[in-house]
Amino acid sequence: EIVLTQSPATLSLSPGERATLSCRASQSVSTFLAWYQLKPGQAPRLLIYDASNRAPGIPARFSGGGSGTDFTLTISSLEPEDFAVYYCQQRSNWRTFGQGTKVEIK
Amino acid sequence: QVQLQESGPGLVKPSQTLSLTCTVSGGSISSNAYYWGWLRRHPVKGLEWIGYIYYRGSAFYNPSLQSRVALSVDTSMNQFSLKLTSVTAADSGVYYCARLLAATALNPDSWGRGTLVTVSS
């Protein structure tokens, strides 16, 4: 099983700041990595698929990068609605999720 | 706009079978643009894929659950279903059904609200 390790566990930032989230895979997943946003009481929302492709309707402030084992999700300027938990997910070998990074208001 | 709604018992006894159905409205389950999937969220273990299925019946399962899980589709009812046998407390969590879009690498673009399932005697 491919294990995804996300860091940091919690990111404390203010609105308007830049957020950089990391996801590291235990073995190469090529670019088969997605990012999701999860808010309390809501279903997950796909943000990025295949490492760098924004899903339909996702604002341009969200961007993804990386390949192989190291990936990043960047939120260029945090909006109030962006404070949530973010998960990465690989589809190279079945599909597994990371443990999540919580982006909280500082 | 497509909507998905999970239904099924919220409480299941250990060793029994968990059965959930997802009803799709606002779109046809028989479209060749989509697969249909199940995921769950455990309070400690986090998010986990269970499996996904095409409307013609080809299914793909999480290897760790494969011996206990079965997905099916009922195109006449525009529904798809999950059966998970021999459940334990570790199977408790929020279960989501989702529509997987081929154009986004079979990642979900629409989800149900989720249904809480507790395994307890």
Image: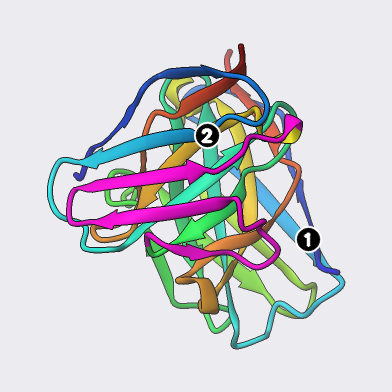
Relative to A28, is A6 on the left or the right? right
Disc 2 and disc 1 in contact, CB within 8 angstroms: no
Marked residue chain, label 2: A
Relative to A82, is A46 on the left or the right? left
Q: Residue placed at 71% from the left, 35% from the top?
A: A79
Check the picture and name the quadrant holding the C terminus of chain B: top right
Marked residue chain, label 1: B
Q: CA distance from mark 2 to mark 1?
A: 40 Å
Residues drawn in magenta: A51-80
What amino acid is labelled 2 in the image?
A: Arg
- Residue A2, placed above or below residue A38: below
Q: Which mark is residue B112?
A: none
| Residue that mark 1 sits on | B23
Residue B84 showing in the rendered view:
no
Observer-nearest of B104 and A79: A79
Observer-nearest of A47 and B32: A47
- Any magenta on residue A67? yes
Secondary structure under the numbered disc 2 in the rendered image: loop
Q: Which mark is residue A18?
A: 2
Q: Residue placed at 56% from the left, 50% from the top?
A: A62
What amino acid is labelled 1 in the image?
A: Thr
